[in-house]
Amino acid sequence: MAALSKRHFSDLDKKQLLRDLETCRTICTRVCAKAPIKGDVYKLAVKLMSDIDTAVETLTGDRHLFHLRGHSTSSKPNR
């Protein structure tokens, strides 16, 4: 019988997951811009964005990492 291998989630895996989550959140933002407000599709996209933000917070500690900033806002938030 084969020995069980231990799973390992590397920094590269984390970076790829964050890229994929960012892509998904960007698509959800586009959906929200087109879908009727309070419609089922709109609600689904908003829920997905919230879940993505929760996942990003777990991975990075920054729930707002993928939130869009205004053009007059600096790229580095003051904390």
Image: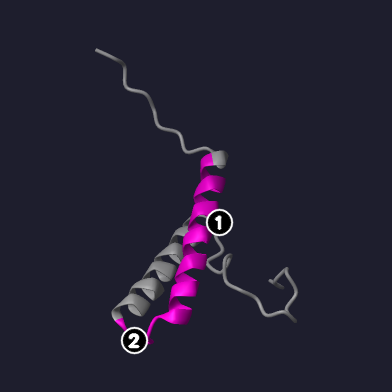
| Residue located farthest toward the bottom when viewing the structure as drawn | 37
Q: Is residue 59 within the magenta segment?
A: no
Position of residue 45 relative to residue 9, above or below, is below
Q: CA distance from mark 2 to mark 1?
A: 30 Å
Specify the label residue 60 is tagged with. 1
Label 2 neighbourhood size at 10 Å, few (<14), some (14-19), many (20+)?
A: few
In the picture of the structure, the residue carrying the numbered disc 2 is 38
Q: Residue at x 72, y 79 (%)?
A: 71
Task: Choose mark 2 or mark 1, whichever is in front.
Answer: 2
Provide residue 22's location: percent of width, then percent of height.
Answer: 53, 60
| Residue located farthest toward the front when viewing the structure as drawn | 34
Q: Residue at x 40, y 75 (%)?
A: 46
SS label for mark 1: helix
Amino acid identity at mark 2: Lys
Of marks 2 and 1, which one's residue comes earlier in the chain? 2
Q: Quadrant of the C terminus?
A: bottom right
Q: Residue at x 39, y 67 (%)?
A: 48
62 sits to left or right of 47: right
Residue toward you, 77 or 44: 44
Magenta stretch: give its range: 13-39
Q: Main secondary structure of the magenta part?
A: helix
Position of residue 15 relative to residue 5, above or below, is below
Provide residue 17's location: percent of width, then percent of height.
Answer: 49, 49
Q: Residue at x 47, y 38 (%)?
A: 9
Q: Is residue 20 within the magenta segment?
A: yes
Amino acid identity at mark 1: Thr
77 sits to left or right of 30: right
